[in-house]
Every structure is written in C-alpha cells, then in structure tokens.
C-alpha cells in the first residue's frame, strides 16, 4: 500500500466582528476555499482541490482552521487563500480573510505549534488587561499550558516538520 502524504495549513480566519466567528462551520469554510481555488486556478485547481482536500479542524472561538491538502500540490492551493474575501453563512456574506500561520506535515506538529502560538498570544494580551482580575485570568491561562509536556514533545519530534528536499516520493 502507498501512503498518501499531506500538508496541513493552520490558518486564522480574521473578521472585523469577532462575534461572527461563532457562525463558522466546516462546510462553509470548505466551500469558500473551493470557490477561491476555482477563481485563482480554474478547472485545473478545482480538480486538484477535489483530490484529498479537507477541513480538519475549526475553532469557532479563536478562528483557527486546519486545512489538509495533498503534498504534491499544496502550494498551488495555498496560493488561492488570499482570494477568500468572504464566507457565505445563512444567506449572508461575512467579510473575512485567511492568515496562514503554519504549514506542517502532520496534525501533531500543527497542534504543538498551535499551543506555542496560543501562549504567545496570551502573553501579548497581558499588557492590555485593564483590571487585576483580567490579568489574573490571563496569567492562569498562560500557566495552564504544560511547559514540561511541550519540552518533552519538542525533544521527541524536533524534525517532524515538513522538508520537501528530504521527503521525496520516489520509493526510496
């Protein structure tokens, strides 16, 4: 059996109204990406998109989305993401754009990156807190991230990210 390799794009959906993030669903994001690929690359891009592409994870509170594409043509599909200007939800157009924050070879590396990224975002939020109660909540959220577990995982899988030069599919 042949293993089909994939690339996972971790993206942030940026909207002007944060309350609209809760309306996000996998099928709406899938349709928006499919439309953008068709716009950017035509029928060829659509055919590549239909082979093994999927929305693997959607967090409606943070706006983080994980997209899966085949390794052979993920860059072509990745190039279509800037063409997403809105998502259609319940008959209304919600203006947004996708900000790609990480490309990984496995879901696990994307999860590790997402933990580190979330911690960085929490540290950025700390100076903007107005009350001491807000600061305590942010500190508690930062400390709840298991730093020892992250270090263990990083030692185990330092080279788990993608490397196109060393990851050829020529049967070696």
Image: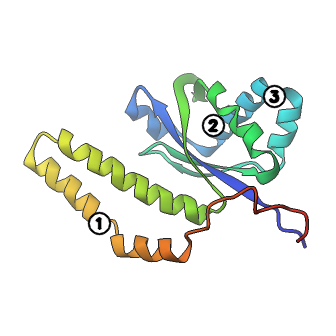
Quarter of the image holding residue 147?
A: bottom left
SS under mark 3: helix
Q: Label 1 near label 2: C-beta < 8 Å?
A: no
The image shows residue 150 at horizontal and vertical percentages of: 42, 70
Where is mark 2, residue-wise? 28
SS under mark 1: helix
Quarter of the image holding residue 169?
A: bottom right
SS under mark 2: helix
Residue drawn at 41 percent across, 25 percent down: 16
Residue most toward the front? 165
- Spatial CA distance of label 3 from label 2 is 20 Å
Rendered view: 121 above or below 42: below
The image shows residue 128 at horizontal and vertical percentages of: 20, 39
Residue drawn at 42 percent across, 45 percent down: 62
Where is mark 3, residue-wise? 41
Determine whether, in the image, residue 133 is placed left or right of residue 163: left
Where is mark 1, residue-wise? 144
Rendered view: 127 above or below 95: below
The image shows residue 93 at horizontal and vertical percentages of: 56, 22
Please tell me the numbered disc located at residue 156: none
Mark 3 vs 1, N-terminal side: 3
Q: Nearer the viewer, mark 3 or mark 2?
A: 3
Residue drawn at 83 percent across, 35 percent down: 46
- Spatial CA distance of label 3 from label 1 is 44 Å
């Amino acid at each position: 059996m042949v293993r089909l390799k994939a690339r996972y794009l971790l993206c942030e959906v940026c909207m002007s109204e944060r309350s609209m993030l809760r309306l996000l669903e996998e099928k709406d994001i899938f349709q928006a990406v499919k439309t953008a690929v068709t716009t950017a690359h035509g029928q060829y891009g659509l055919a590549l998109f239909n082979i093994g592409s999927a929305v693997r994870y959607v967090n409606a509170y943070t706006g983080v989305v994980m997209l899966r594409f085949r390794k052979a043509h993920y860059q072509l599909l990745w190039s279509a993401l800037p063409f997403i200007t809105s998502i259609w939800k319940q008959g209304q157009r919600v203006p947004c754009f996708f900000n790609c924050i990480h490309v990984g070879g496995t879901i696990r590396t994307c999860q590790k990156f997402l933990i580190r990224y979330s911690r960085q975002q929490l540290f950025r939020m700390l100076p903007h807190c107005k009350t001491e109660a807000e600061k305590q909540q942010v500190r508690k959220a930062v400390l709840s991230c298991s730093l020892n577990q992250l270090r263990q995982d990083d030692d185990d899988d330092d080279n788990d990210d993608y490397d196109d030069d060393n990851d050829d599919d020529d049967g070696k």
